[in-house]
Every structure is written in C-alpha cells, then in structure tokens.
Image (cartoon, rainbow, N blue to C red):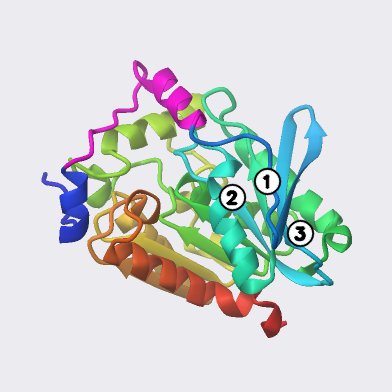
Amino acid sequence: MSALELHAEIAARAAAMPPIVIDDSTFAAVRAATATMFGGDPVSTDTVERLDHVVHEDPRVVVRVHRPRGLQGPAACLFSIHGGGYVLGSHAMDDSLLEAFVNEFGCVCVSVEYRLAPDSPYPGPLDDCLAGLEWTVAHANDLGVDPDRIGLMGVSAGGGLAAALSLLARDRGGPRIASLLLQCPMLDDRQITESSRADGLIGWSRGANTFGWRCYLGAQYGRADVPAYAAPARAGDADLVGLPPTMVIAGSADGFRDEDIDYALRLTRAGVPTDLVVVAGAPHGCVELFDGTEPARRWSHAVREWLRPRLDSRSS
C-alpha cells in the first residue's frame, strides 16, 4: 500500500528528511535525542509568566502554568497535553504555542508533565493528567481562572489522553470540561483502518504506532477488552453522550485520519456538538514538522478560530 498523498509543498520538504525509526533497538537513542530538544527552567517574558508547580511527589507530577502578566481574572484556561506517541516528549514542547495563546487570547494555559510508557504504561499517564486537571480546578482562584471555562487540548498521544480524560472526568462527576480540542489524536490501538495500515507515512509511521501502543498498553496490548479510557476509539456510541463541545482536526495524509474522522462522526451521532476539519495533504505533525507550509497555516488558523470564542477574555 502506498503512502497517503502529501501536499506538494510538504512532499518536497519530506524528501530531504531522514526517516526516523522507532522500535526496540532505536527507542533509547530517539528518546535521548528528543529530550535534548526540550526542557530547561521555565522562562518568563515581558508579557507572560511561566511557573512550574508540583502536583504531588509520588508519583511526581508537574504542571507548568502560563499566565498573562498582571492578569486580573477570572480568565478562561486551556489545559494542554503534549504528544509523543505515549513514549516521548515533554510539556516543554508546548511552551511557545501556549505562550502565543496567552498573548493572543489573554487566557491561562496549563501543561502537564505526565509519566511516559513503557516505564509507566496505562493508566499511569492518564492518572497524571487527571491529577493535573484536578489541581488546576482546585487552584483556579489562585491562578485567576474561571473554573467554568477550562478546556482540554491534546496533540497526537496527547489528543488520545485528552479524549480519555474527558470520558474519565464525566464518569467520575468532574472536573467539568468546557471544551475539547483533539489535534490528530491517537485513539485506536487496533490499527484496523485503511489509513493506519498505509506504508511510508510521514511524521508517525505504522511501525512507530505499533510500538507506541504496545508500550502504552503493556500486557493489555492486542486484547479485545482494552478499555475506552486507554483507547478512546473503543468507546461505543452511547459511551460518548454528554461529552463537551469538541473539535477534531486531522490531516488527510495522516495514519490517524480514518480513526479521527470516525470518532468525530460518532461524537456527532451521540449529540456532542462537534467540528471536524480535515486538512488536505497534511501528514502527522504537520504544524510541528512543516511550519510555514500552506497546510500548516490552514491548520493553525482553524485551531485558533475554534479556540477564540472559548478562550478570548473579550468573549467572557
């Protein structure tokens, strides 16, 4: 099976990029390389202050809060969960994007540093995300946050965790989530769709997807009874009722395309107000890997226009 068709501008760039293979033999080196790309102490700017808070020590969970300087509040809040296939990444990946949102919308952004698989398989990362969200709600007044305007955002595996967290929070009676933004979410461990089985995928390959799910699910990988809290695509239509207004955005050249479209359609059938955007020619990680291209610009514009009425202080 050939790769899904890329936008010409992205295809030209991708041709010059060396392939990244993530498997048992390369994982340690890939994780070490990605770790050096992010991290360091939180940095405050003239307009945004960043501060890390320890939610609890055992296991250690940290959230990074990005706030407008001089915030009078209460402001809307975006709780962000980073990507990385459940096995890579850091909340520092989101620093520049969240700072841009703070400057543009006057909101507060919180990113969570969750444990990674395979060191901590499901439900460890999800538990960490829940702890971070609960901490944010509990400290809303201190942060200048309106507890009724806290939305979730996740990218890739972070999108899978955000979808799972919305299910978990609803079923446990809180915290209340005002909106849900799922960017190219990693939702289905079964890899049964046409797009997930494509060869030559850019950004996140079929093999990397298998590796990520195997690490995250551990002994549950390959079983028929994987819970929806671990892989949200496993949820039945009735299980999606009562979720917050949602946006799902995916690329037409992403291996997650089909599972993302299907999830958005099922949310709609369950009565959840859902916006679905499919960006033509965009692969996985379009904005992160191919910034400045036409698909990346269209992606970023769609995300910001959806977030604006939910986060902008002028819309409160």
Q: Tag 3: residue type?
A: Gly
Q: Does 25 appear in magenta?
A: yes
Who's the residue at 53% across and 28% down the image? 117
| Residue tagged 3 | 173
Q: Is residue 295 rendered to the left or right of residue 73?
A: left
Q: Percent x, y for residue 192?
A: 29, 45
Is residue 224 visible in the rendered image? The answer is yes
Residue bounds of the magenta highlight: 16-36
Label 3 neighbour load within 10 Å: few <14, some 14-19, many 20+: few
| Frontmost residue, 165 versus 100 | 100
Q: Tag 1: residue type?
A: Val
Q: Percent x, y for residue 232?
A: 50, 51
Disc with the residue nearer the chain's start (1 vs 2): 1
Q: Residue furthest top?
A: 25
Are dots 1 and 2 in contact, CB under 8 Å? yes
Q: Percent x, y for residue 221?
A: 44, 30
| Residue tagged 2 | 95
Is residue 123 visible in the rendered image? The answer is no
